[in-house]
Amino acid sequence: GFKISYEWAVRFMLRHNLSTHTRRAVAHPLPKDVEDNASCFIEFVQRQIHTQDLPLSMIAAIDEISLFLDVEVLSSDDRKENALQTVGTGEPWCDVVLTILADGSVLPTLVFYRGHVQQPANVPESIMLEAKENGYSDDEVMELWSSRVWQKHTRCQNSKGMLVLDCHRTHLSEEVLSLLSASSTLPAVVPAGCSSKIQPLDVCIKRTVKNFLHKKWKEQAKEMADSTCDSDILLQLVLCWLAEVLE
């Protein structure tokens, strides 16, 4: 029986610093101890950059976006726009590994496709595709990223580097740390709970990429409402959209 008046709602929202508009995660205050961890991390990173004299082209951030596909919805005549999502349960349909540099450059994006596919006729230059029927383990993903993207980049730089990455256990395995060590790269591990504030990809890039993919697929789904679309066709579209948004 509790009724909320307009005035009560406004007072409540003002008192708790709330808004009718969604605030970016970076605008939300963190708990004190987490905020302290974030500050310590930033100080550590800045100190290392100056001490090691790291060029901006050798400071990178890496993060993943997982794409989930509902094949049943994809093959249906309606609700096609709900087939492709950036959140879901079970194994992802694709994992997209993004890498940006502190000088503003975007390194080639690795896309890991769970399934068998004939090499698409048109893989954009900025995208690298890896496909396997049963998908890739977390260690395999990082190993391939290291050899195909990061080591290729560091070979022509002749300098130490730094990699900002979150504290997901797969990023901190012995194999991954040894790969980074081999390329003279210092891991800068974002403390738990701080990614929304200080992981550059989380703050600036990932939401834009996700929104762009959602928008493109929604438009495409309307166009092909009465036609069939299989996983391979969708993969080709997603690769082109990724190249477009990262451009």
Image (cartoon, rainbow, N blue to C red):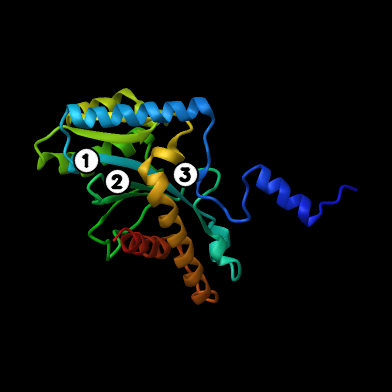
The residue carrying mark 3 is: 26
**Residue drawn at 25 percent across, 44 percent down:** 102
Please tell me how crowded label 3 is: few (under 14), some (14-19), or many (20+) other residues with Cα within 10 Å.
some
Label 1 is placed on what type of residue?
Trp
Q: Is 71 positioned to the left or the right of 53 in the image?
A: right
Q: Which mark is residue 99?
A: 2
37 and 240: which one is in front?
Answer: 37
Q: Is 194 positioned to the left or the right of 110 in the image?
A: right
The residue carrying mark 1 is: 150
Label 2 is placed on what type of residue?
Thr
**Residue drawn at 81 percent across, 51 percent down:** 4
Label 3 is placed on what type of residue?
Val
Q: Secondary structure at mark 3?
A: helix
In this rendering, the answer to whether 53 lies above or below 61 is above
Toward the right, the furthest residue is 1
Residue 12 position, x and y percent, is: 72, 46
Q: Secondary structure at mark 1?
A: helix
The numbered mark, 1 or 3, whose residue comes first in the sequence reads 3
Q: CA distance from mark 3 to mark 2?
A: 20 Å
Residue 90 position, x and y percent, is: 53, 43
Residue 49 position, x and y percent, is: 22, 32
Q: Quadrant of the C terminus?
A: bottom left
**Residue drawn at 46 percent across, 59 percent down:** 211
41 and 15: which one is in front?
Answer: 15
54 and 177: which one is in front?
Answer: 54
Is the Cβ of the residue at disc 2 closer than 8 Å to that at disc 1? yes
